Amino acid sequence: MNLASLTRGEGLVVVPNPDRSIFRARNPPQISHPHFEYSRAIDTDSPFTLRGTSDAPIEKSGRHDQIHLIHLSPINIQGLKKAALRDGKLKNCTTFQAVAAKIWKARSIAVEMAEGKISTMLFPVDTRTRVVPQAPVGFAGNALVPGFARASVKELKEEEYSSLVRRVQEGIERLDDEYVRSGIDWLEVNRGVPCREDSFSLVAWWRLGLEEEEFAWGRLKCASPVVVKPGIVFLLPGPTAEGGLNIFLELEGDQVVEFRRLMMED
């Protein structure tokens, strides 16, 4: 918002407030929940540690065909939402929840995780309005906390789709004020990092709102990550004429074939 305004030669729309004291760890720390979304840091960790890659050194492949873009049409998405509600166990289901549950299952199976492994899907949640008191107007800091859903691969294969969607919903619902503050305290004590064991991060970029901003040269036509790292899956807006969503991820060729098949099956 501010950036778009400045390119038009106008002033700040919102004055940034850099005060992060609202997200300060408590003294003494009060860890009231288990925090499966985090792992304890090790000596080799850096701020750029990749999700799900702790068991083996990261090797840069010479191949250039591992980045894939898979389109989900509005019809595909509507079908996922209907499938989630079909057995009557859920009262509602958002697009993110339906798509996230399907990606979680499909990716965990496609990369051939053992059935006994616990697969963890992380997804950033904005907690500005979830903490008490809420973050002030103009708060300029990062208030994203990893929500998560976790289950064994066997459960992902055998549970009803509505159950997997419900796990995603629970991952969002649990992030109330006390849970967020317990997580901050856990990080203060353990100096941890986002979960690294058999995990990946799902990042939704189609709801950033950038496409609504009017820059000096017009509206944004395309926004995408410059680099896609292993262990990160992006959800991007679909083509303007088609709508829907694009899944942007890195997988080996045979894995993405299976991932695509699982994403499109009923």
Image (spheres, rainbow, N blue to C red):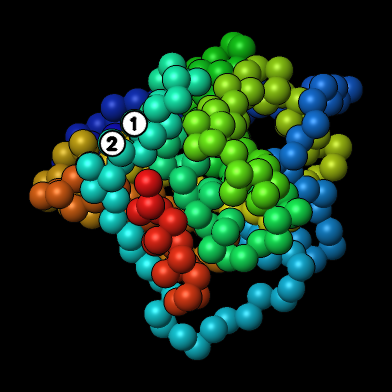
Measured from the top left, where is residue 151 in percent x and y? Answer: 67, 42
State the residue in front, 216 or 146: 146
Measured from the top left, where is residue 112 in percent x and y? Answer: 62, 65
State the residue in front, 144 or 236: 236
Crowd band around label 2 with a 10 angstrom C-alpha radius: few (<14), some (14–19), many (20+): some
**In the rendered image, which residue does mark 2 sit on?**
78
Going by the picture, which residue comes out furthest to the top?
Answer: 133
- From the viewer's perspective, tell me whether residue 63 is left or right of residue 108: left
Image quadrant for the N terminus?
top left
- Residue at figure coordinates x 59%, y 11% from the top left: 133
- The amino acid type of the residue labelled 1 equals Lys
Measured from the top left, where is residue 210 in percent x and y? Answer: 28, 41
Q: Is residue 128 above or below residue 111?
A: above
Q: Quadrant of residue 64?
A: bottom left
Q: Are marks 1 and 2 in contact (CB under 8 Å)?
A: yes
State the residue in front, 111 or 187: 111
- The amino acid type of the residue labelled 2 equals Gln
SS for dot 2: helix
The dot on residue 250 is: none
Measured from the top left, where is residue 194 in percent x and y? Answer: 68, 48
- Residue at figure coordinates x 68%, y 65% from the top left: 53
SS for dot 1: helix
Going by the picture, which residue comes out furthest to the right?
Answer: 28
The dot on residue 82 is: 1
Crowd band around label 1 with a 10 angstrom C-alpha radius: few (<14), some (14–19), many (20+): some
